[in-house]
């Protein structure tokens, strides 16, 4: 499922007054106030991501051979950003791709089967979590090497620019990637060539278990990026509506030839860096992360606005769990590729 | 400065006869190495880019082995195996030179880290790099770590507004000082073609590095009067070069010190004699025996 975004592009020529009016509206804000239906859809998406991960982690504990980088606590970022994208917009992500994949409209069945390494997975079980790709829905790829996705996404944006499309490319990465040289070169080229790309830095304050100040000259990445002459914005990562609105504004700029845009989202990672890896952050830090859970915050907001009632909430949760269970059944039914079959699918072996 | 200019002129002649390989000259940028090196202590370290002739002479390399090294002879400083772009002289704490643009930044950051935390010396590291190097990934990683670890590093940017034959609008999206500021590194600017101004700025910066123990950048605006590399055509027009030649650091220095023709000729003669001796020494030296390469 991909969200439709309707830009205001007039088909017929406008009178001068009309054009001025349109421009003044556009200048006021390029973001929209989400409807109740949309809010519920955003909430459902966040719950789906959480349900998916919870199930995967539980299965892994029970002995299934799965190893994932949990996205727990950062769901609002991918949900907010991807909800403002069109299907043909491209996404390139890092080693933590489920949230982005599900939000971009990927199927849970295919993803689960991929994690299980089965042939009915998205990449026939050969990619796994960290080399996921489904160009059909605009999910270009995930890359396990920290920072590498940035230059790749910049290349994808160059393709869009040379093809004169109106599409944007979104690149997700963490704050640790900004200490990498690929970050510097990628952002610089995007600035020099005015590429249609939105960089989304999910700043969770830790590189595995190392606090950001140990490896970054500035905890917040955005000021560093301003040094390239790129527009930047910093958003609270627990606020899904805020993330969506900022994304809409950024995309408006990007689609109208404004060049690259950098959005930093401050989040807290609730889970460990990687399942089965010891989380050595202080207990206080972990408790703070749990307190900033975006799903709980958004649910409270929806309940207060009377958009969501308790039975509806229970229904959404039950549906998500059912979907995940279906995905697990789907994955377990699948078969692994034989070595010969797998070798036919890769460029070199 | 005159020595550097004359050595380079001589080497350029040797390039044309085929005795020296294709070298990178710093004609027009001599004031930077001379000014900065004169403010460094003998205990301070130096890491440079691919234009090594100027900083090497400014650091006081002995002429004979230096010339032999450039001409690839066995009596050279590094046995003739390093050549112009890898030359080093640990005795003078001239630690590394790199032909890969930008690499020197991260290596210098590491060296400064070692100097401060492992050797615990009261020394600083000066790194010379060009403006194009600041667009390189290595520069980014090096500066980030230098700022995080607070290492005593002086970054001297020789801003000649060219990368080979490419203009800055193709490799620099924003001013260089902004890039340093984004890491929290203080950057100051000066005219790199006036040796007294370079010395003044370098003195302030070096004092700042020693006092604060953290990196400081010095951006020096300069002109490259020679080609990027021997044998590579220059895309700049003659008119532009003539305009740049007016900013020649040697002209400025002559005027400042009030050197007359007689003194200049006398100086030139004595330096040329030294150079001729060095070249003769290098010519008489054997070529190096190839060491066995272990695969």
Image (spheres, rainbow, N blue to C red):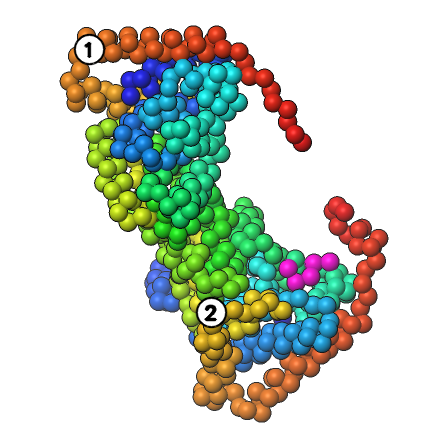
Q: Residues within 10 Å of mark 2 (few under 14, many from 20)?
A: many
Q: Which chain letter matches label 2? A: A
Whole-Å distance between the Cαs marked 1 and 2? 69 Å
State the image coordinates of residue A95 (x, y, percent, origin top left): 59, 60
Residue A267's disc number = 2
Q: Which residue is mark 1?
A: B263
Judge left or right: residue A108 versus residue B87. right
Q: Which chain letter matches label 1? A: B
- Judge by depth and name the residue closer to the eye, B33 or B27: B33
Name the outermost residue toward the left. B258
Residue B292 visible, this orientation: yes
Judge left or right: residue A175 versus residue A27. right
- Judge by depth and name the residue closer to the eye, A258 or B293: B293
The kind of secondary structure element at disc 2 is loop
Task: Between label 1 and label 2, give the one nearer the viewer.
Answer: 1
- Quadrant of the frame with the C terminus of chain B: top right
State the image coordinates of residue B157 (x, y, percent, origin top left): 35, 37
- Residue range (magenta): A126-130
Residue A271 appears in which quarter of the rendering?
bottom right
State the image coordinates of residue A260 (x, y, percent, origin top left): 45, 53
The kind of secondary structure element at disc 1 is helix
Magenta region includes residue A146: no
Name the residue: 23% across, 28% down.
Answer: B194
As drawn, A101 above or below B27 = below
- Judge by depth and name the residue closer to the eye, A118 or B238: A118
């Amino acid at each position: 499922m991909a969200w439709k975004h309707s830009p205001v592009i007039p088909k017929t020529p406008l009178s001068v007054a009309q054009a001025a009016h349109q421009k003044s509206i556009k200048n006021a804000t390029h973001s929209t106030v989400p409807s109740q239906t949309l809010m519920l859809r955003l909430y459902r998406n966040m719950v789906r991501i959480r349900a998916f991960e919870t199930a995967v982690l539980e299965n892994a504990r029970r002995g299934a051979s799965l190893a994932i980088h949990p996205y727990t606590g950062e769901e609002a970022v991918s949900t907010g950003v991807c909800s403002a994208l069109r299907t043909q917009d491209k996404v390139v992500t890092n080693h933590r791709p489920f949230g982005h994949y599900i939000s971009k409209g990927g199927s849970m069945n295919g993803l689960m089967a991929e994690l299980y390494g089965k042939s009915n997975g998205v990449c026939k079980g050969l990619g796994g979590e960290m080399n996921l790709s489904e160009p059909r829905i605009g999910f270009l790829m995930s890359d396990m090497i920290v920072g590498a996705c940035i230059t790749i996404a910049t290349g994808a944006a160059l393709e869009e620019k040379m093809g004169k499309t109106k599409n944007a490319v979104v690149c997700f990465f963490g704050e640790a990637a900004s200490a990498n040289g690929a970050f510097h070169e990628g952002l610089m080229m995007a600035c020099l060539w005015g590429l249609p790309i939105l960089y989304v830095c999910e700043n969770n304050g830790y590189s595995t278990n190392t606090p950001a100040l140990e490896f970054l000259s500035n905890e917040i990445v955005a000021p560093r990026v301003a040094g390239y002459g790129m527009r930047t914005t910093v958003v609270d990562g627990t606020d899904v509506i805020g993330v969506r609105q900022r994304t809409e504004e950024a995309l408006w700029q990007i689609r109208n030839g404004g060049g690259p845009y950098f959005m930093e989202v401050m989040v807290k990672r609730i889970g460990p860096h990687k399942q089965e890896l010891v989380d050595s952050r202080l207990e206080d830090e972990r408790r703070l992360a749990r307190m900033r859970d975006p799903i709980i915050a958004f649910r409270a907001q929806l309940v207060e606005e009377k958009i969501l009632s308790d039975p509806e909430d229970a229904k959404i949760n039950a549906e998500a769990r059912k979907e995940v269970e279906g995905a697990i059944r789907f994955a377990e039914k699948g078969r692994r590729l034989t070595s010969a079959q797998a070798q036919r699918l890769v460029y070199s072996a | 400065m005159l020595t550097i200019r004359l050595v380079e002129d001589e080497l350029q002649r040797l390039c044309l006869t085929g005795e020296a390989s294709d070298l990178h000259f710093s004609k027009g940028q001599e004031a930077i190495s001379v000014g900065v090196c004169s403010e460094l202590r003998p205990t301070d370290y130096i890491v440079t880019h691919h234009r090594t002739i100027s900083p090497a002479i400014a650091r006081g390399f002995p002429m004979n082995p230096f010339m032999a090294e450039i001409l690839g002879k066995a009596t050279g400083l590094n046995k003739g195996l390093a050549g112009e772009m890898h030359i080093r002289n640990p005795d003078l704490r001239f630690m590394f030179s790199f032909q890969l643009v930008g690499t020197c930044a991260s290596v210098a950051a590491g060296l400064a880290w070692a100097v401060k935390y492992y050797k615990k010396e009261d020394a600083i590291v000066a790194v010379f790099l060009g403006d194009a190097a600041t667009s390189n990934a290595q520069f980014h990683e090096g500066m980030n770590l230098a700022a995080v670890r607070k290492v005593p590093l002086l970054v001297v940017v020789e801003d000649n507004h060219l990368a080979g034959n490419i203009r800055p609008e193709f490799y620099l999206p924003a001013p260089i000082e902004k890039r340093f500021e984004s890491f929290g590194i203080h950057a100051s600017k000066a005219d790199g073609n006036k040796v007294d101004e370079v010395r003044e700025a370098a003195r302030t910066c070096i004092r700042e590095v020693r006092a604060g123990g953290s990196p400081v950048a010095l951006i020096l605006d300069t002109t490259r009067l020679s080609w990027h590399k021997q044998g590579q055509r220059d895309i700049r027009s003659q008119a532009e070069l003539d305009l740049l030649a007016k900013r020649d650091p040697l002209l400025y220095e002559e005027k400042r010190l009030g050197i007359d023709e007689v003194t200049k000729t006398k100086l030139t003669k004595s330096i040329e004699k030294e150079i001729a001796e060095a070249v003769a020494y290098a010519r008489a030296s054997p070529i190096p025996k190839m060491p066995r390469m272990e695969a």
